Image (cartoon, helix red, strand yellow):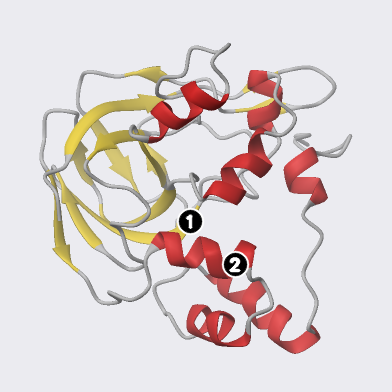
Amino acid sequence: MNTVCVDGVYIGKAKNLGQGLISDTDKHRVASRLWLWPQGLGSDEQGDPRFHSGPERALHHYPAEHYDYWRKRHPQLDWAAPAFGENLSTRGLTEEHVCLGDLFRWGGALLQVSQPRSPCYRLSHRWGLAELPRQAQDTGRCGWFYRVLKPGFVSDDQPFELLQRSYPGLSVAWALHAFYTEPLEHAGLKKLVDCPALSSRWRDIAIRRLRTGKVEDWSARLLGLPLEGLRA
């Protein structure tokens, strides 16, 4: 594995964008150390806790390398972290280099890769690009989430190190392909179901596809619905 360079650490507050939409994609850089909790990083807030945050989506990691691609595809925008609402930006790791269940040490915390990110319509609202969530999904430039096995202080000047790899054949890139490009391919779904490190949400969806032979409707996630993002 390549040397991993932490480019930036980001947190933010959930904001009301109007029409009931609560977004968490506008984050700011933090240079001081933060406590990484099992529920998330420092005081970071999420727009919709049903689909963001929680113990299996505590930290979002997005490769800084991807921004070269987005600058070429949409040159009218000034792409830079944390444009995808990431908490952690690095160089040296992409979806091809990271596997489900990988254990990483970052500062005083111990992290485990739990699932790829499923891009949603909040990216569209932030950047005015209706097609952006689908483009991220189709190209596999989604990033991934961690669960926190051991809380601790973290910062951008502390090393980010791979400690253990239990599922070398199940990269995040492979999982994205199996889940979105070939969503009903039996062997791929079976591998997802049989990986205990994968989040329960992704495993439950894979089980349902195997049972029904149908793919769930992605339109609400990719395009949004009038009531999505409302807080009680």
Depth order, front residue of 38/66: 66
**Badge 1 amino acid:** Pro
Which residue is the site of mark 1? Answer: 116
The x, y position of residue 176, in whole percent, is: 52, 61
Image quadrant in which the C terminus is located:
top right
Mark 1 near mark 2, Cβ–Cβ under 8 Å? yes
Disc on res. 36: none
Q: Please say if 78 is above or below 221.
A: above
Q: Residue at x 21, y 42 (%)?
A: 92
Name the quadrant containing residue 164.
bottom left
Q: Is residue 199 visible?
A: yes
Which residue is the site of mark 2? Answer: 179
Q: Earlier in the sequence, mark 1 or mark 2?
A: 1
**Badge 2 amino acid:** Phe
Point out the frontmost of discs 1 and 2.
Answer: 2
Q: Secondary structure at mark 1?
A: strand
The x, y position of residue 11, in whole percent, is: 41, 26
Side of 173 where 153 appears, left or right? left
Q: Please say if 112 is above or below 157.
A: below
Image quadrant in which the N terminus is located:
bottom left
At label 2, counting other C-alpha atoms closer than 10 Å, the crowd grade (few under 14, some 14-19, many 20 or more) is many
Q: Secondary structure at mark 2?
A: helix
Q: Please say if 214 is above or below 82.
A: below
Side of 199 where 10 appears, left or right? left
The x, y position of residue 141, in whole percent, is: 48, 44
